[in-house]
Amino acid sequence: MKLSIIMPLYNEAKTIDEIMKRVAKVKIGMTKEIIIIESNSTDGTKEKVKEYAKKQNVKAFYQSKPCGKGNAMKLGFKKATGDIILIQDGDLEYRPEEYPKLLAPILNDKTKFVLGSRNLGKGDWKIRKYKKEGTYGSILNFGGVFFTSLFNFFYRTKLTDPATMFKIFKTECMKDINFKSNYFELDWEIVAKLVKKGHIPVEVPVSYRSRSKEEGKKIKFFRDGTRVFGAIIRFRFLN
């Protein structure tokens, strides 16, 4: 068994060393293949990636310009050779140490699709709390609740966190699926299309520490919110 870890990177020079160290260190009982998609960063990330690409289990692919996280992820999917795919951002919002519990339901044949839920079991939907950017955090929190409710209504699911970065699924789940989104809305398209194929995800609670805009968070609510809204509706009725 092999795990393909898809890591889209753009301007993550401050965190790439730490995240790569933690991903390499975690033990999962199978081969790890780290696939980095570097989108022509301007902060030194690209140079760091070139060093990591010299390692045996790291494959790096370079885009000539940033085309969106979703676009980078789609390229990563095409390059993956593992039996299972896991998505990992280049920041430190999620903990790679939680890979084993996320993989467990798949390895135990309970499901082919897992979501790492930031909300499950917490009893608090306010997952983003910033001292200096309180309004921004509140807007993102509200958007998360709104879009999750909208998704559950249209797809007849009871998910708590479709937008989570931690999406883990067997590579075979993507067979005959053509992903179309190029930005953050791909997170929703993945869940929408896998659910429509009958792969209802098992949700596993995970830790989460959201970074602020000052720390490098790239989501813009109105721009990306519009795209997410369109994706939820569009992929319910179209392929």
Image (spheres, rainbow, N blue to C red):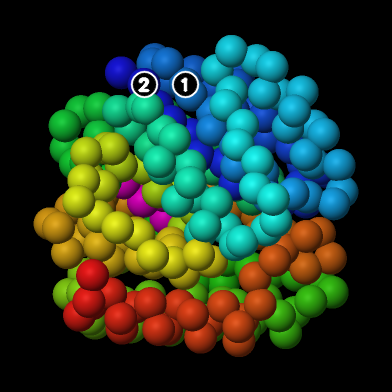
Q: Return the mark for residue 32.
A: 1
Instruction: Give the residue type at disc 1.
Output: Lys
* Left or right position of 202 against 57: left
The picture places residue 73, in percent across and down from the top left corner, at 49, 50
The picture places residue 97, in percent across and down from the top left corner, at 54, 31
* Left or right position of 93 against 187: right
Q: Quadrant of residue 228?
A: bottom left
Between 140 and 59, the one lying in front of the other is 59
Callout count:
2
The picture places residue 95, in percent across and down from the top left corner, at 58, 40
Instruction: Give the residue type at disc 2.
Output: Lys
Between 111 and 230, the one lying in front of the other is 230
Which region of the structure is painted magenta? Answer: 114-118
Up/down of 146 relative to 88, above or below: below
Q: Are marks 1 and 2 in contact (CB under 8 Å)?
A: yes
Q: Residue at x 70, y 66 (%)?
A: 218
The picture places residue 3, in percent across and down from the top left corner, at 40, 27
Q: Residue at x 48, y 42 (%)?
A: 76
Report the residue marked by disc 2. 2
Q: Residues within 10 Å of mark 1 (few under 14, many from 20)?
A: many
| Distance (Cα) linking label 1 and label 2 | 6 Å
Q: Provide the major secondary structure of the magenta segment.
A: strand
Is residue 205 visible in the rendered structure shown here?
A: no
If the image is split into quadrants, where does the N terminus sit?
top left
Q: How crowded is mark 2: few (under 14 residues within 10 Å), some or many (20 or more)?
A: some
Between 93 and 178, the one lying in front of the other is 178
Up/down of 216 relative to 234, above or below: above
* Left or right position of 42 against 166: right
Q: Which residue is drawn at 40% across and 84% down?
A: 230
Q: Quadrant of residue 214?
A: bottom right
* Left or right position of 65 against 109: right
Residue 139 colored in magenta in the image? no
